[in-house]
Amino acid sequence: MRKNLFKDVPREDSHYLDYNASVKSILACIACFAAGLLCMAAFRGPINLKVSADTQPDAATLERFLRRYYAWPVELLSLKVTPFKAATMPGFLYATVQAVPKAGKGEVETIDFQISNDGRFLLEKAPIRVEPDPFREVREQIDLRDQPAFGSAVPRVTIVEYGDLQCSYCKAVVTVVRQDIPRDFGREVRIVFKNFPLWEIHPWAWDAAASGRCIFKQNAEAFWPYHDWAFDQQGRLTPEQFKKSAAAFAQTQKIDMPKYTACLADPDTRAEIDRSLQEGRAVGVTGTPSFYINGHHIEGSQPYSEMKRYINSELEFLNAK
């Protein structure tokens, strides 16, 4: 399946596992069986790539396979494949391939994949690790330091949203994030917002992310009024109008404007947003909004009923320990 990093994500059906103690063993069997089917379905092969002495699959053979499989024409796209490294799954190597438009315009397609050591099978999706906490590894990759957050100071469930302030699907879940979840789970849940601006399709998304960072650095509590205000500006402002309006809003929050302006021009601000984008991609974000509920990835503009089910699932699992 192709990964397109530059897209909004509409509402999608979600799947839920109930950790009720009376059916744990049955669910464990079903989960293991489903994981096996997913891994088997993701294999593409055999492709019979030659592997060199330094465990690098033959580049020419791999490129021919990828171009045909994904219909990447030579005249339009150049392929960049990272050096292969040992994957977490024994017997496999890991790499990333990018299909880059030769004209310099258009979307870059990025696909992470694993290939067997003998060069015969390619796995498009990471295997599911069967262990008591399958989301631990993802959770540990998400940096929660110095990020806008609200809710419980000692949460049992942490929800991280990778969002774009110009994304209409992100706007659709503002009420869920800002009202519904805090109302029902205020003592147990903490919500964290991380920037994932889709700047190629949303012209002022990056400026909105930068303004949010600069407001947050001066006054963490002022970020959330700004967050809500920014979503309300969708469809109303050009990029230049947004910059002026964001500065005017910052003034209403008693932000020091010389510091705010200097922050917007500071390369560190851009670097912070870049790190958030890189981190999101590393944990599997392909569009916005993307939520991680204790590390469990939920993609798209989900209704409250679905978000509630995932939160309750985590709480039931924790209560059963």
Image: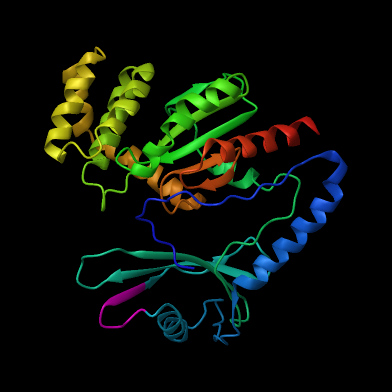
Is residue 268 visible in the rendered structure shown here? no
> Quick check: is 242 in the magenta stretch?
no
Q: Position of residue 296 (x, y in %)?
A: 60, 44
Viewport quadrant of the C terminus: top right
Dividing the picture into quarters, in which one does residue 154 lie?
A: top right
Q: Which residues are magenta?
A: 72-79
> Quick check: is 74 in the magenta stretch?
yes
Say which residue appears at 53% left-offset and 23% top-offset: 182
Dividing the picture into quarters, in which one does residue 135 lie?
A: top right
Is residue 253 visible in the rendered structure shown here? yes
Is 145 placed above or below 49 here?
Answer: above
Is 316 placed above or below 102 here?
Answer: above
**Residue 137 shown left or right of residue 71 in the figure:** right
Say which residue appears at 54% left-offset and 46% top-offset: 298
**Residue 313 shown left or right of residue 269 in the figure:** right
Which residue is at the front of the view, 30 or 150? 30
Q: Position of residue 235 (x, y in %)?
A: 22, 40
Q: Position of residue 221 (x, y in %)?
A: 38, 17
**Residue 62 shown left or right of residue 297 in the figure:** left
**Residue 101 shown left or right of residue 237 in the figure:** right
**Colour pattern:** rainbow
Is 196 placed above or below 73 here?
Answer: above
Is 60 placed above or below 126 here?
Answer: below
Main SS of residues in magenta: loop
Which residue is at the front of the view, 85 or 63? 63
